[in-house]
Amino acid sequence: MPIVVVGLSHHTAPVTVRERFSFPEAAIPQALQKLRDTGAVHEAVILSTCNRVELYAVTDLDDTGSFSVLRDFLYGYHGMEDSRDDSVYSFSEPSSLEHLFKVASGLDSMVLGETEILGQLKKAYQLALEHKQTGGRLNKTFQKAFNVAKQLRTDTSIQRGSVSVSSVAVELSEKIFNTLSDRTVLVIGAGDTSEKAARALVSRGVTDIVVTNRSFERSEALAKVLGGRALPFDQWDTEFDRIDIAISSTSAPHYLLDRNKLLPMMKRRRNRPLLLIDIAVPRDIDPEVNFMDNVYLYNVDDLQTIANGYIKQREEESARCEAIIREKARGLLAAFPRIPTPHR
């Protein structure tokens, strides 16, 4: 039974589309079961990040049938049956294995060679494993992907000078403010992405940092590590009178901040420049605020501008990595039992 992949990413769809397909982490176990309940999928993993949503599945259908089932599920789950376009891609073996290995290694990321995606992929796999939605084929394949990613980090220079999406956000901050040492930063959401962004800010000289999260205990824990202070989540907007930068990455299903809410805040702060970095998908901040005076809003797609500079530095090493990936994918396929002819 072959492994197939169906999904969309920053390569094929802007954030305005990707956010409509995202899976909240808490909903993934149920979504996996619903996918398995179609009867066409024997194993499955759902990867949902700010830059991609992908379904990895083992099926005994032919390519046409498996792609149809997975696309129907992806569109139907999100109520998008009438909005089909070319943003969703499909891969079958061996391309599906090569794609997974590239994702794990950061070769398919917005920032070429970044390491954050590997942690996200491991988390997605572990979630499916814990809920018994994987089997021998996906287990072996994902473990191989993690090993390939480790080998490429060790044996190539693909990650030399590499940065995560979070640290690219910090690079953007430094382009707006010449120095960060005298700036006050508010971090909204204390998850993995926000923590990485906060740590990057501190490494660049930020000493005044405020952390807020729906779980106050989590805010306190992260604030203690960063040498900052925690703020109850229902009070985060009170900090806008004094902050310079806000980085938001929550799992809220709606905007936390829009033009009507921000307008009185800007009046109180006498229209001092405000940098907003929204690295959440779905987005936390209404894009309309970008039209306000002295407000500078950037989302995950906007980070591509900075990322492009790093991509050029690693293009040559990327070709070497892809050659290794092709070899590893062929080796893995050869190790699997022979696949019978798919049902048609």
Image (cartoon, rainbow, N blue to C red):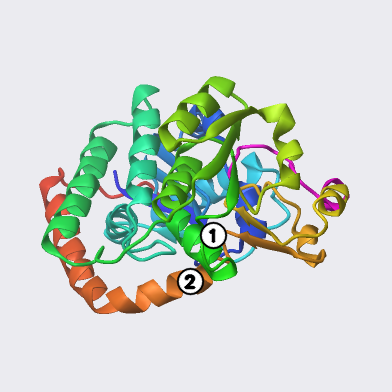
List the single residue furthest toward the front.
182
Residue 70's x, y, as percent? 51, 47
Residue type highlighted by circle 1: Val
From mark 1 to mark 2, how far is it between C-alphas?
Answer: 25 Å
Pointers 1 and 2 in contact (C-beta within 8 Å): no
Residue highlighted by disc 1: 88
Looking at the image, which residue sits at the far top? 217
Residue 340: percent from left, percent from top: 24, 46
State which quadrant residue 42 falls in: top left
Q: Which secondary structure is most common in the magenta stretch?
A: loop
Q: Residues within 10 Å of mark 1 (few under 14, many from 20)?
A: some
- The reply, left or right, for residue 87 in relation to residue 263 is left
Residue segment shown in magenta: 249-263
Depth check, front residue: 48 or 90: 48
Residue hosting label 2: 306
Picture disc at residue 307: none
Q: Earlier in the sequence, mark 1 or mark 2?
A: 1
